């Protein structure tokens, strides 16, 4: 396997695993999850010999700006800033995957994958930690009361 092909495979596996970690948290809407998955799969074949990438960058930039504006509006109206930010992160990752040309684009994809991992492990997302353990970690138990001193009768 050539280095370029191995690099592409491992990069896409990194982004796909971060994407799955983010959407499994439940904060990303099903529509964004579906479009993100299809977009990442479609971007695999969107390369320079087949497509003139620079011809389409304006479209992906515009879609990213629209997604940012829509995410801000929904975040303010619903109060779900984490969910809207995660959805924007998915759309931004798909846009970057479609417009990759140079090494800096791959580095930006790695950065976006890291941000998806961080957003997927946010404390506001449902945690697999049981409620009792979470209560013990956040509110440590109080020590038992000290017994009263015993009286000595002489």
Image (cartoon, rainbow, N blue to C red):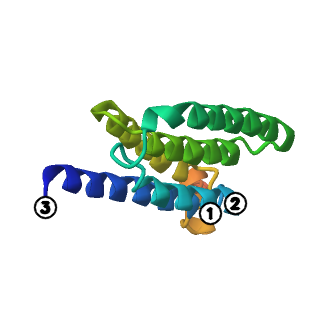
Judging depth in this view, the residue of 140 and 92 nearest the camera is 92
Marks 3 and 2: CB-CB under 8 Å?
A: no
Q: Residues within 10 Å of mark 2 (few under 14, many from 20)?
A: few
Residue at 32% of width from left, 31% of height from top? 104
Image vertical order of residue 107 relative to residue 154, above or below: above
118 horizontally vs 110: left or right: right
Marks 2 and 1: CB-CB under 8 Å?
A: yes
Mark toward the viewer: 3 or 2: 3
Q: Can residue 64 be seen in the rendering of this structure?
A: yes
Q: Position of residue 42 (x, y in %)?
A: 48, 58
Q: Secondary structure at mark 1?
A: helix
Name the N-terminal-most of marks 3 and 1. Answer: 3
Name the N-terminal-most of marks 3 and 2. Answer: 3
Residue at 57% of width from left, 37% of height from top? 60
User: Which residue is denoted by mark 3 in the rendering?
Assistant: 1
Where residue 18 sits, quadrant-wise, is: bottom left
Quarter containing the C terminus: bottom right
User: Which residue is denoted by mark 1 in the rendering?
Assistant: 34
Q: Position of residue 126 (x, y in %)?
A: 62, 61
Q: Which mark is residue 31?
A: 2
Image vertical order of residue 151 relative to residue 116, above or below: below
Q: Residues within 10 Å of mark 3 (few under 14, many from 20)?
A: few
* 3D distance between C-alphas at marks 3 and 2: 35 Å
């Amino acid at each position: 396997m050539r280095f370029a092909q191995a690099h592409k495979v491992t990069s896409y596996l990194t982004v796909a695993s971060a994407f799955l970690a983010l959407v499994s948290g439940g904060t990303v809407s099903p529509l964004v999850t579906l479009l993100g998955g299809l977009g990442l799969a479609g971007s695999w074949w969107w390369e320079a010999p087949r497509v003139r990438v620079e011809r389409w960058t304006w479209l992906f930039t515009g879609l990213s700006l629209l997604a940012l504006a829509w995410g801000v509006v929904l975040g303010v109206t619903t109060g779900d800033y984490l969910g809207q930010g995660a959805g924007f992160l998915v759309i931004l990752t798909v846009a970057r995957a479609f417009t990759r040309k140079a090494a800096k684009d791959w580095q930006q994809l790695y950065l976006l994958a890291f941000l998806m991992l961080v957003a997927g492990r946010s404390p506001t997302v449902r945690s697999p930690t049981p409620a009792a353990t979470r209560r013990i970690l956040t509110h440590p138990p109080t020590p038992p009361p000290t017994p009263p001193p015993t009286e000595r009768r002489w």
